[in-house]
Amino acid sequence: MDPNATVNSPFAPGARPLAGGRAPTVSSEYLRMFAAGVEARGLDIAPIFAASGIDAAILRRRGARVRVGAAAEAWKRITGLLGDPLFALKLADGLPMGAITLIDYLVMSSADVGNGLQGITRFAPLMNDAEQLTLTVQGDEARFRFHNGNGLPYPIEMIVGVFVRRTRDLFGPGWSLRRVCFAHAALGPRSTYDRICQAPVQFEMPYTEVVFARELLELPMPGADARVNAILTGEAEGALAALTPANGAPSFVGGVKRMLEDGLLEHDLTLTRLADQLGVSTRTLQRRLRAAGVTHRGLVRVVRQDHATQSLATRVSQGQIARNLGYSGAGAFQRAFKRWSGKTPGQVRRKPARPRSR
């Protein structure tokens, strides 16, 4: 096989710029994770990195970063060379505890699962700032959700694989998942997803997320150490501040949009729900939105349009997209989409390509 070949993917290359126009990046620690997995499979990472525009010397420099587009190219080259589109999902099989350096140890020293996951969501940009992780609780369920900013499935599958493996290693039979959902189609055999996730797996869903019982958030971490955790948290905060200066910090409007994205799954995009989540009155929230130059209705439209556009790049039916967005049926969704974009859903829909069989 041509070492420069890449697998076909239904996901657009590149990544959306961050606040202030800054290009998203990944860290040397992130690169070391999949470099270790590549070399364990018998490949030399140096020429793969070189072909992707990455100097392999970065692996020896703590905290160094490269553009996420270069990392995405490396992902595609690796999966193509291995002929294994599920390489990322299986990566955790050979990734020892501590391989994710600071974040691994920060989680292990946390008081309980909930605190550990909150640490991951806050400090995930230290590894890859093109992705966002959120932890939400609804009723008796907790959802650890993955928002991919570069459109590539491999990094997301790596995170899911690491999550399910780490939790089983830490808690054994005391831990179980209710379901694992992927926003993309299956990249390989269903049996591999079943083996790794050990839970019902669903594809082409509105979000990629791991769902488990809310009560598991209270499980104490085996290595809980408040003093060590405080030291590591301080180090992580410093690294995060250096990575995201004040003018690049997440905005109020951006936070509201993420809450609305979560609200899609609950079919509740109301102003009341948002205000409750923010701990303010609806009047105060409206005032803050006006001051930011937006409205609740406008943000709902943007979130629905973004979700619809992403879903139309998959095989999810228009009827299902309509239900996910809270419309009464496909007709109502089609009319709304035409108002937003000037085009019908059918005009923008494209058939997703599948990875080549190797």
Image (tube, rainbow, N blue to C red):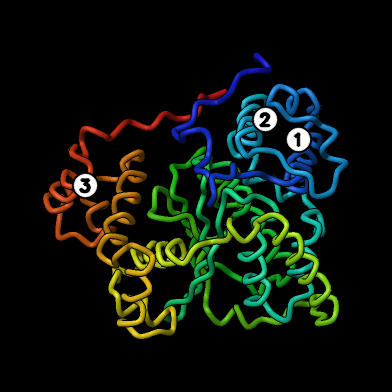
Q: Residue furthest top?
A: 2
Q: Nearer the viewer, residue 182 or 297?
A: 297
Asked whether disc 3 touches disc 1, contact meaning CB atoms under 8 Å apart, the reply is no
Determine whether 138 is above or below 358 in the image.
below
Q: Is residue 241 visible?
A: yes
Please name the amino acid that badge 1 sits on: Val
**Residue that badge 2 annotates:** 78
- Whole-angstrom CA distance, mark 1 to mark 2, is 7 Å
Q: Nearer the viewer, residue 83 or 2?
A: 2
Which is nearer the N-term, disc 3 or disc 2?
2
Q: Secondary structure at mark 1?
A: helix
**Residue that badge 1 annotates:** 38
State the residue at coordinates (78%, 28%): 43
Q: Secondary structure at mark 3?
A: helix
- Whole-angstrom CA distance, mark 3 to mark 1, is 44 Å
Asked whether disc 1 touches disc 2, contact meaning CB atoms under 8 Å apart, the reply is yes
State the residue at coordinates (80%, 41%): 36
Which is nearer the N-term, disc 1 or disc 2?
1
Q: Residue furthest right?
A: 60
Please name the amino acid that badge 3 sits on: Trp
Assign the N terminus to one quadrant of the image.
top right
Say few, some or many: other residues with alpha carbon within 10 Å of mark 1 (under 14 / 14 to 19 / 20 or more).
Answer: many
Assign the C terminus to one quadrant of the image.
top right
Image coordinates for residue 299, horizontal then vertical, percent: 32, 60
Q: Nearer the viewer, residue 166 or 289?
A: 289
Please name the amino acid that badge 2 sits on: Ile
Image coordinates for residue 212, horizontal then vertical, percent: 53, 71
